[in-house]
Image (cartoon, grey):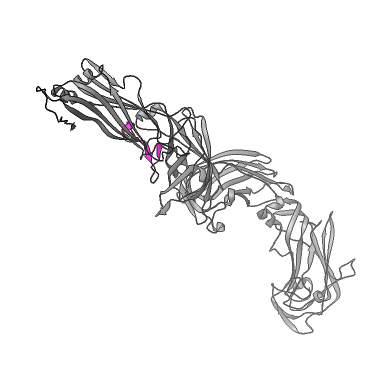
Amino acid sequence: MALVLGVGACSDMPTRFLAPEVPLVVQLPLVDSLLTLQELIADTTQLHIEPGSGNLSLALAGELTPVILGKELGRIDTLRFERSFQLNDIAAFREHFQGWSHGALELPLRSLFPQIPQPPAEAVVPPIAAPVQIDSILRLPEEILAVAYRAGTAELRVENRYPVPIRIEAPAGYSQPGIVLRTPGYGEWFVPVSAAQQVIPPGESRGQSTDPGGPLHLPLAGVVLSAETQLSLSLSSPGSGGQRVAYSSESVLRVVLQPSGVELVWARVLPSSAWEAELPVEVPLPNDAALSGGTFHLLALRTEVENGFPIALRGEWRFGQLRRNGTPVRQTFSLGAGERREDELVLQGPLALVPETEDQGVIRTLRLRSWVQLPPAAEPVTLQAEHGVTVRVVVDTVAIAWAEGRQLPVASFPAQAESEVWLQGNLGLLSQVEVEFAELLIEAQLENTAAVGFRVEGTIEVADRNRGVLARLPVPPQTVQPAVKEAGILRGQQTRWELRYTGVRLTERPRFVRFLWTVVPEADQGWAFADTSRLRGNVTVLIPVRMRIQQLRYENQWAWTGGEVLRRQGQKLERATLVVEVKNRFPVGLQLFVVFSDSLGSVRVPPEGELVFGAAPVEASGVAVREQHSIERIELDERHLPGILHAQQVALTLVGRTEAADYVRVRSSDYVHLRVMLRAEMSLP
């Protein structure tokens, strides 16, 4: 409290003594307060102050719904395989009709020279003056009764194991040396020999590619061989030239017929043992995926096998890449002639995925081998070229527990994550303002527990409490760091995004933030994931606050002892003035009044209305550029002075408002400095 005393004197002495009147001015401070946003807003725990600018933002935070990466990265949609394996497509069956090791014809030495002793012996082998015609039944494998060829080549090889030379002559009915094959009812086929092939010295052969004259080939198109097929050739020999030569039972002329590259028209067979064949079912993994290993929880598939042979089949599915307790998985089946069988196979895990030898360490194809058997037959069976087995496989479900490799099954996948964002505290007086959401800063903290890096882009939807979309915002390409694989354990890595958007207009406070992503894995250096791998985290939405203040209200009261001070003077209060000084840096106009009160009543200053103070000047963005300094003086009249003298409390009310449709930005550095004093004037006797 300050006292200002004024004393006046007169040069003339009064004729009678009068008590002098001394003017007394008393200045009583009422309020001296610096009010910042923290005083004007009851709870600012959810307000974020941006470093540097001091701008205020609403901070709304929540946890994102996780993206289950194990399901997305290992997504193998329905895989299909269908193939008909006809007779000529089944290599193991076709081998029965080519590559014979049987001798088609073996002529002992005495069949051409009957006058020599029985072997073993030594004798002079006489010459053959006239060619000898040899007709012999062709020896086929015992299981093949007859076979008609559509294509292929038969190699004829003549091996001379005689101790004398042999010469191939022209057979009956032919003018050129050669060999004849004849099947009654189907025709005959001639294989000519050249001059270099005509004479075969002892211990040599003709007909192989390394022999003189090269190979002897019979095109098999249209050829039919059966148990009645004859091999005919005409032979001569100069004999041993009068010299004794040794020979044995192994001294034979051997003619071998060896088909290769054959295609059949039909075959009449009588299998004495099971004919077993592998029907490869190879289902490529999507996206050229390359897996070096893994574990399946489940593999569910449907198989269909149609037996087109006129004979029953036994079969077995063999999953060489899948191991249960170290053993390849197998499943048997059987089919009657012309029968079709459908099965649903549900292979429960854990199933280890292990590359086979032909995978060369990397699995790019799910390989299911169907092994089939033609069992021994009691009666002959005719197999046509169109006979065969049709295999259909549909892989419905592949549930991966763990996988690693070089190329993922998916090139990209859509993902959605949502967070319900909340203001946890009570914003207090901010509920009395209308907020314009003109900018957004979205921060996301993500944890990736898959050893797969990602490139992510898409859209952010900001929605209200009814999930109505307030804004759709583009997400420029972002990266997500991969987890670290250590000793078979995936350790999650953190990635932080900060996305700033301007020019956004939201009609109300957001409640939901939804990420609609396209996720592109980046796994050039190898990857690994488990079914527990997740992309999870939280999101914070920072909204720089621009407000149209409807009612920003500040109230406070203090004990008032100034009236007692004045009463102790014992003099009449002649005049009182309320002096209000305001330094306003808020971009908000202010209205203020003061109330003096006791238990019997109150006095409001100013008596009617409020004191009005202008807002701080603002720039285009609504930010205050300097403080607005104002001083107001209110003269108090006789009606109010008694109330002020007896008042026990003084209260101050400050109300802030913006003009209609005006939005301003309040910063942490904004303030209002209030100073209120009561100036009282009286005279001392």
Q: Is residue 51 magenta?
A: yes
Q: Give the image quarter of residue 126.
A: bottom right
Q: Going by the image, does 390 lie left or right of 556?
A: right
Q: Which residue is nearer to you in this view: 537 or 160?
A: 537
Q: Which residue is nearer to you in this view: 174 or 657?
A: 657
Q: Which residue is nearer to you in this view: 442 or 379?
A: 442
Q: Which of the image's four quarters has the N terminus?
A: top left
Q: Which residue is nearer to you in this view: 452 or 621?
A: 621
Image x and y of residue 307, in percent: 67, 43
Q: Is residue 134 visible?
A: no
Image x and y of residue 428, in percent: 35, 29
Q: Give the image quarter of residue 144.
A: bottom right
Number of numbered callouts drawn: 0
Image x and y of residue 527, in percent: 48, 53
Q: Is residue 210 magenta?
A: no
Q: Residue at x 20, y 29 (%)?
A: 25
Q: Going by the image, does 112 lie left or right of 679?
A: right
Q: Going by the image, does 139 lie left or right of 680?
A: right
Q: Is residue 482 visible?
A: yes
Q: Which of the image's four quarters has the C terminus?
A: top left
Q: Going by the image, does 347 lie left or right of 560?
A: right
Image x and y of residue 571, in percent: 15, 21
Q: Where 339 falls versus 484 (above or below)?
A: above
Q: Residue at x 88, y 67 (%)?
A: 172
Q: Where 319 falls versus 639 (above or below)?
A: below
Residue at the left extreme of this rendering: 17
Magenta segment boundaries in residue numbering: 39-60
Q: Where 589 falls versus 478 (above or below)?
A: above
